[in-house]
Each structure stands twice: as structure tokens, then as C-alpha cells.
Image (cartoon, helix red, strand yellow):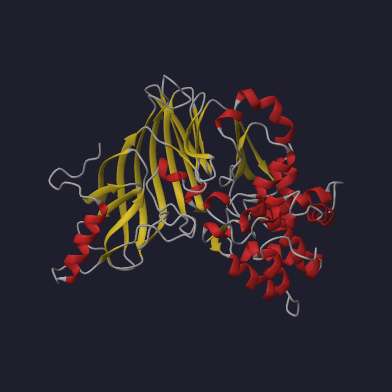
């Protein structure tokens, strides 16, 4: 059950917003207006919220796995205190946070009790006083309960996934709201401090660097910090029993932290030993690594059905192969550092990471990228209909943002650019793109404009029209 400050009962979000708007119109002293619930993403319109920008998340979590049916997480409990530091981008009388499930105990803004209400994934908050435009403020939410597993429009699962010995939090595209209240959209990136307390004998792994570990009263606390901006969908928490390895890379001694479920240790050892080689190769091709640590989390195959580029520490469902490791590490440049403005721009993540696979094969005695392109283009609309079902820059719905056109045809767009400008200019483009938008957000229009600026005199009209936005199989390879 949800409850608010005892003296003021919670009201539905739409009534709170309506009441605030009416008061403002009547000249009753309230001059701000409620921030929007959702940022009108073309595929997830309720994701994120308007009126503020988060700069930092301070999450203090305590998790106890259930003792019953672990597959469903029965009996498990998460207790959290989330403090968000944010800047109001407009004069606000109220604002929303994304939080699905869990019980909210209380909310404060700048240390003062705030009114709040729940409606679906929206946690509507009314501060004691209006927030001025450009004002920096802190909102703290105390919450607890059994976190939910969320099913995507494409049928995959995210959110909080109970595992055989703990849990795994995966956020793409909207799963983070299952375990933290926030602005759950890739357009709002922030730094993070994530502290997780778990029963002694379990580890808790997250993004960034481990700042501390201590045990008291039969429980162990792990403190993680991610100083570089991170989208909510890239935040992760993995709780369980892991074999931990620590090392450093290169002359800068980049910290490497790898956590592997013991059942996967033997199978994963060989491919994870290639991580230094892959990182060096990707830095050579894509430019300086954009974060202050790297690594991986390898869990059991049944605990997640897909790999995910969680920032600094990709998650793998079982031992990955080399190609998958190349793909997820490439995302650290394309997707994690340069993050899409909306989910319509997903091809800027997946097209680049898929093309990294092609380049790796080309440089390691496999097919050239052009041979891979030609083999794919040889497929007609009848024998490979999924590839030509929609253009990479315009998926047909939220259920299809992770389909083949986004990945494979997105990579084909990059090969078309490479053939048009030549290798030297192409690598200037991919490295310059990563540098120009480092730790920021970008969309397809930003990318096409950047390519055209970097290659003056070249005509990209046909590539954009036929390969990036065109329906069906283009007439010419």
C-alpha cells in the first residue's frame, strides 16, 4: 500500500495536476506548473518526465533474495532510498518520477515533506514550495517491496530479474523504473552512487568503480560510483555469488572488474582473456575509451535471455563468444557514451556495434565488411523478409526497435558511407562522432549532418533516402 505524509492524503496524479493548474489560473499564488509525465518519445511516450534534468542519483539499496520460489522472486525484498539531484528547467509546482510497483513510504524535496501520488508508472510529487526555473533541488524517495520483472513490447524481460542466487537488474528500454525512481529516458543522463547491502556471502556488482566493501551484522555493503554521465537504462545491479577478477589495462592502468557466475567460469575464461586485446583494437578504431573502468558480468544462461551493454560492465547470459564481446564493448562508445536522444535512434547504437563485429572479422582473417554486406544484400525480400521489413531509422513500433533492420541494415548504412568517403575519412567520421558527442545525446539528424560536414562534396542523398529511411530493399547495393 502507498502512503504519504500523514497530514495530507495522496491524490491521483491527474487530479493533483488539474488542481495545480486551476489554482495557477485563478491567481491563487501558485505560479509554477506541473512538469509533463513523459517526454513524448515516439515509441515510449510515457517514459521520462518533463520540467527537470537529473545530474546525480544517490541510491542506497538493501536486497534480500527470497527463500521460496526463486524463479519468481517470491519473498524477496528490496529497500531503497533514492536521492536525486536535479535542475528545474521550468518553473515547477509539481513533477513526476518513473517508478513501477514497489511501495513508497515518503518523499521529501529539499528536506521538507512533499505531497505525492501514484498512477501507473508515475510518481507525482508536489514540493512544499514551487521550484524556480534553473533551481537545483534534491528529491528523496524512501521505498520498498518486491521489484517487478517487466515484459517488453517485443516479449523480452527486463527490470528486476530474480536469479538462482540473487537478482539481476537490466533496464533497456524501460526496466530501470522497476528498482529506482527516476527520469527513465535516455535523453537524461546523470552520474551515480549505488550502494547495495546484501546477505553475507553474496556479492553486489554495479557500474563504475567499487569504492568500498564492508561487512557487519551478517550483511555486506558494496559502494559503487559512476562519475561519467549514464542513462538510466544502462544502470545495473547484479546480486549473487561470483568469481571476481581485478586487473588493469594499458599505460593508464584502466581498472578492469569482471564478475562471473562460478558455473560459467570455465567456459568464459578463454573469451574474457581477449578483453584487453579487444579494448586495444576498439580504441585504435573508435578513439579513446570514454570511461574510467571496464569489465563484464557473466551470469547463468537462464537468468537473462540477452546480453546488454550496461555501462562499463556489460552483462552476458552465460559465457559470451568473441563476436558478442566485441559488440557489447563497442557499445561503450556508441550507445553508452554517445546515447540516443529517443528510442527511434536505436540504430545509432546497434548499427555501430554490429558494424564493429564486421570490422573485427575483417581485421582477424574473416570476411571483409564489404563481403558481409554483399552476402546480406544477396538475400531477397522473400528469403530474408525481416531485413527489409522497415528502414533502420524508422522502426514500425516499440516491439521492433531491436529487430534486424536496426542492427544489420544499420551496419549496412555505415558500409555505404565507408564506400562513399574512403577508409581514411570514414575512420575520421566514426572517431570524430564518438568524440563530438562524448557523454552526450544525439539523433539521426545529428549524425547525417555530421557526416555531410566531414565529407564536403560527397552526395549522401541516396544513402539517406534508400538505406536509412527507405522502405523495402534498395535497388542498388
Instruction: Give the quadrant of the N terminus.
Output: top left
The residue positioned farthest toward the right in the image shown: 365
Q: Residue 209: give x, y in percent of width and height.
A: 53, 43
Q: For residue 352, what is the image quadrant?
A: bottom right
Foreground pick, 95 / 79: 95
Q: Residue at position x 41%, y 19% from top?
A: 67
Rendered position, 79 above or below 312? above
Q: Residue 444: give x, y in percent of width and height.
A: 60, 66
Instruction: Give the quadrant of the C terminus.
Output: bottom right
Q: Residue 96: give x, y in percent of width and height.
A: 32, 54
Foreground pick, 8 / 154: 154
The residue positioned farthest toward the front in the image shown: 382
Q: Residue 125: give x, y in percent of width and height.
A: 27, 53
Q: For residue 55, what is the image quadrant?
A: bottom left
The residue positioned farthest toward the top in the image shown: 68
Q: Is residue 110 visible?
A: no
Q: Residue at position x 74%, y 32% from top?
A: 270
The total of numbered circles placed on residues is 0
Rendered position, 422 above or below 354? below
375 displayed left or right of 195: right
229 displayed left or right of 280: left
Rendered position, 330 above or below 135? above
Q: Is residue 380 visible?
A: yes
Q: Residue at position x 68%, y 70% from top?
A: 465
Amino acid at each position: 500500500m502507498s502512503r504519504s505524509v500523514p497530514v495530507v492524503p495522496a491524490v491521483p496524479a491527474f487530479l493533483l495536476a488539474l488542481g495545480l493548474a486551476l489554482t495557477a489560473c485563478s491567481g491563487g499564488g501558485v505560479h509554477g506548473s506541473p512538469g509533463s509525465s513523459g517526454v513524448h518519445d515516439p515509441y515510449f511516450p510515457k517514459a521520462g518526465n518533463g520540467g527537470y534534468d537529473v545530474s546525480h542519483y544517490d541510491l542506497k539499496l538493501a536486497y534480500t533474495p527470497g527463500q521460496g520460489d526463486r524463479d519468481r522472486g517470491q519473498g524477496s525484498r528490496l529497500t531503497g532510498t533514492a536521492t536525486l539531484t536535479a535542475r528545474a528547467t521550468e518553473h515547477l509546482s509539481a513533477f513526476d518520477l518513473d517508478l513501477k510497483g514497489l511501495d513508497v513510504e515518503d518523499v521529501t524535496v529539499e528536506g521538507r515533506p512533499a505531497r505525492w501520488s501514484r498512477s501507473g508508472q508515475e510518481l507525482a510529487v508536489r514540493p512544499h514550495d514551487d521550484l524556480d526555473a534553473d533551481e537545483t533541488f534534491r528529491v528523496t524517495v524512501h521505498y520498498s517491496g518486491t521489484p517487478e520483472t517487466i515484459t517488453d513490447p517485443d516479449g523480452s524481460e527486463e527490470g528486476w530479474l530474480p536469479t538462482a542466487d540473487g537478482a539481476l537488474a537490466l533496464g533497456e528500454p524501460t526496466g530501470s523504473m522497476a528498482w529506482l525512481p527516476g527520469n527513465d529516458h535516455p535523453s537524461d543522463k546523470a552520474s551515480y552512487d549505488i550502494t547495495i547491502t546484501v546477505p553475507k556471502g553474496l556479492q553486489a556488482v554495479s557500474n563504475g568503480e567499487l569504492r568500498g566493501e564492508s561487512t557487519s551484522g551478517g550483511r555486506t555493503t558494496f559502494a559503487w560510483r559512476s562519475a561519467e554521465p549514464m542513462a538510466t537504462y544502462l544502470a545495473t545491479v547484479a546480486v549473487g555469488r561470483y568469481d571476481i577478477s581485478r586487473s588493469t589495462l594499458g599505460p593508464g592502468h584502466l581498472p578492469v572488474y569482471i564478475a562471473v557466475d562460478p558455473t560459467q567460469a570455465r567456459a568464459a575464461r578463454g573469451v574474457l582473456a581477449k578483453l584487453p586485446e579487444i579494448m586495444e583494437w576498439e580504441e585504435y578504431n573508435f578513439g579513446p575509451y570514454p570511461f574510467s573502468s571496464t569489465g563484464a558480468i557473466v551470469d547463468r544462461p537462464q537468468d537473462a535471455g540477452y546480453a546488454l551493454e550496461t555501462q562499463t560492465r556489460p552483462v552476458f547470459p552465460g559465457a559470451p563468444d568473441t563476436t558478442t564481446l566485441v559488440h557489447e564493448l563497442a557499445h561503450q562508445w556508441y550507445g553508452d557514451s554517445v546515447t540516443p536522444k529517443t528510442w527511434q535512434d536505436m540504430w545509432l547504437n546497434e548499427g555501430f556495434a554490429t558494424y564493429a563485429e564486421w570490422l573485427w572479422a575483417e581485421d582477424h582473417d574473416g570476411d571483409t565488411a564489404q563481403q558481409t554486406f554483399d552476402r546480406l544484400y544477396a538475400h531477397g525480400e522473400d528469403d530474408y523478409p525481416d531485413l527489409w521489413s522497415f528502414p533502420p531509422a524508422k522502426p514500425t513500433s516499440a516491439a521492433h526497435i531491436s529487430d534486424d533492420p536496426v542492427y544489420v541494415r544499420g551496419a549496412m548504412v555505415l558500409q555505404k558511407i565507408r564506400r562513399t568517403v574512403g577508409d581514411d575519412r570514414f575512420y575520421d567520421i566514426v572517431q570524430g562522432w564518438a568524440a563530438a558527442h562524448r557523454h552526450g545525446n544525439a539523433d539521426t539528424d545529428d549524425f547525417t549532418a555530421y557526416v555531410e560536414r566531414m565529407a564536403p562534396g560527397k552526395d549522401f542523398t541516396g544513402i539517406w533516402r534508400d538505406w536509412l529511411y527507405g522502405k523495402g530493399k534498395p535497388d542498388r547495393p
